[in-house]
Image: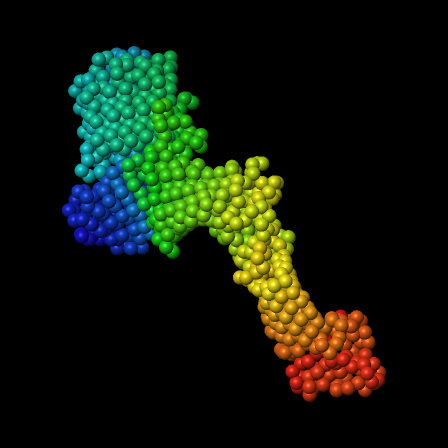
Amino acid sequence: MAQFFAGSLAELNTAIASANASGDAVNTITLTSSFALTGAPTILNPQGGTALVIDGDGFTIDGQNAHRIFFANSGDITIQNVTLANGLAEGGDGGDGSSAGGGGMGAGGALFVNSGADVTISNVAFAENGATGGDGGRGALVTGGGGGGGMGGDGGDAPHLFFDPGNDDAITFGIFGGGGGGGGLEADGGGGGMRSGGDGDDGAAGIAAGEASGGAGDSGGHTGTGGTGGIDGGGGGGGGGGEDAVGSGGGGGGGGIGGTTATSQQGAAGGDFGGGGGGGGEIIDLGETGGDGGFGGGGGGTGAIIGIGPGSDGGFGGGGGGAAPVIGGDTGDGGFGGGGGGLGVTGSDPEDHVGGGGGGGAGFGGAIFVREGGQLTVGAGSVTGGGVSGGAGNIAADTALTGSDGIAAGSGLFLQGSGALAFNPGAGETTTISDAIADETGVVDAGYTPPAGYTPGAWSLSMDGAGTLILSGDNIYTGPTTVAAGLLQVDGSIAGSATTVGSGGTLGGNGTTGAVSVEAGGTLAAGASAGILTTGDLAFSAGGLMTAELGGTTAGAGGYDRVVVNGTVALPGAVLTVALIDDFDPQFGDSFTIIANDGTDAVAGTFAGLAEGAQFVADGRAFAITYKGGDGNDVELTAIQAVIIGTPNADLVNTTNTVFGQLPATEGGDIIKGKAGKDKLSGAGGDDDIYGNRGKDKLFGNEGADNLSGGNAKDKLNGGKDDDILDGGKNKDKLTGGNGDDAFAFTTKLSNKNVDKITDFGKGDDVIQLDHTIFKKIGDGGELKAKFFAYNKAKDKNDHIIYSVKSGEISYDKNGSKAGGETLFAKVDKGTILDHDDFFVI
């Protein structure tokens, strides 16, 4: 493995060139500091099956809003642990000419992935990057077509005409300049040569090492020499023509990687990322059309002043060239996203003959552009703050006949053609894409009309990692979305994509999706916590999961989960899980529309085990479900009180066991009623009412302010936590209040067979409640008055509640000090101190 280090642009370029040429299996470039770009870095182009790794080590590369940061041309490339900020991919402007060249495409402000590259990014933050289409050239009083802008370099200008004052005969002067060369990748095309055999300018050198150069310009009709094409860059300008009508100027060379050479007055076609050359200057159309743009390049302008020569077409994203001035042909079409060229203008004087302006180039992929055939895998990281704008179509002189503007799409990522985009954040990692992802079909669906005969492509998206992917932009990619693992949180829109949630994957968020299919083992969970997710058709396979979190009574953040479905709903055998969050305590009768189904179509199927009207316990609370809620076709939950009725047999009721066909105990306020058997009835966390009725029962309130009533037999009542009411009923019962301020109630007719034992009076601020209809001599409500209470025995006619500290026995004496009226009804532990204020009349 070869290791290289870089702390500046110069060091980075040296390292990239060395790594590209290295024969080692893996070549790693590690940054040693943050730095800003003063030019475009060398293209990433590892050869011979080698792999290139760029490790930022936490540093930042700043494009200064002037330069694209990385162009991945081919090979296996990994970029990791770096911030790529303020990169700018700016399409080249079309050259001025008798008809102007179209602008080039701006694509991938921080990263361009070419068709031969397989790129993985991990822990990369893309911040404030942009892509801007180049402007179309200006139709002007010149002879020779303007070169098309490249994907960075400007198209070359054709030379200007100079008319002899007072002489309108342009043919006499015969000033026919060469066409401008097409722009390349970060390299300008050469200008056309001027009159009388003037030489065309050389095209500028590009940055794509090891590829073909921009093409050279043609030599022109007489002695002018066409400019040499730049290495991997701009096309050479065409040579100037002679001094007569047959001495046409030479066509401009095509720009870009592999741009062709002009061999006549016709401008040459651009190569990859290059604009077409402008046509050579001529008074009458003899075939002096411009060359078509290559991928990302604008079309060249035609060179003739009079004729039907059309402007040339832009390549993908490139603007079209303008039409000839006099008579005029068709304008050049923009490539996908590029604006078409403008019409020319005919005047009464030769100097008023002006060709059409060029169309603007497209701006695609503010942060990242992926060309069809390229592959991109995205790990943890973020894409934020990106922007895109199309180039402006330019004018024909000062008229209103302009070329069309280029369009813009994909402030985050633009995916060209067709392909598959993969996200793979690891467990505990998050990838956040705040900017929009776009593909060609999404652009068309948004209202753009593509060039005639062009079939737009679409990209799929897959979430394959165990971490979290957050999509919060207004995305317009249209291929299918697959959640194979981890969480896809849609907080923006993926409305143009159908989503499949596979086993182990989860779809959530507060945004909008297209149709959603949840397979067995997959989960739909709206929101990030509680939230609202809007879908198209919603279909579950048997075993698919839906989670509904309830944290309030209003759908959305701070409330509960809702899925809004614009389409059909199918739930055959799906599994519903309900969870309470944020300490929410639903009240009986609270309702929750967890699926809001549009229209009037009925919900197909039901959740597993939950037929229409079924009652169930979830997270300790009881609910009823209906599939006919809301306006008649919504899935709605209602919080209910669990009512559990025992059998004549010995029943066991708690949170895990219950009477057959009934709910178990819940965390709400349950009603649990035993019957004749020896029942063991336990509440859970709510304020329960538990009745033993007949049989020797054991009642346990557990948490909550419970009301326990034993019934007829010898029962054991245990209040548990909180403030409980325990009523033994008939027979000799054992009452244990537990923690809390408990009340021990005596509401049953007194007898010597009906004496309850209170085992822990005084553990809290406990009280003994006396029913005034049974204890008739002590008033009808409130704290027991002191005059009715006595220790050991009645001493006067008002002493009715008699307590013995020594024995712990509590009696009621209906006769006071008179004999024959005392009845024992309760016992506490011996030595317990009681007074009149420990009793309360009810």
Residue drawn at (28%, 48%), measured in percent from left and top? Answer: 79
Q: Position of residue 233 (x, y in %)?
A: 23, 34
Relative depth, front residue between 770 and 50? 770
* On screen, residue 177 above or below 272: above
* On screen, residue 328 above or below 137: above
Residue drawn at (62%, 73%), measured in percent from left and top? Answer: 716
Residue drawn at (20%, 50%), measured in percent from left and top? Answer: 27
Relative depth, front residue between 100 and 450? 450
Please indicate whether residue 98 sits to the left or right of residue 720 in the image.
left
Residue drawn at (21%, 27%), measured in percent from left and top? Answer: 260
Query: Quarter-wise, where is residue 344 in the image?
Result: top left
For the image, the number of numbered tags is: 0
* On screen, residue 10 above or below 839: above
Q: Position of residue 593 (x, y in %)?
A: 57, 47
Q: Specify the farthest residue to the left.
A: 23
Query: Quarter-wise, where is residue 377 in the image?
Result: top left
Residue 589 visible to an observer of this rendering: yes
Please indicate whether residue 721 sits to the left or right of residue 378 in the image.
right
Query: Quarter-wise, where is residue 441 in the image?
Result: top left
Quadrant where the C terminus sits is: bottom right
Relative depth, front residue between 247 and 615? 615
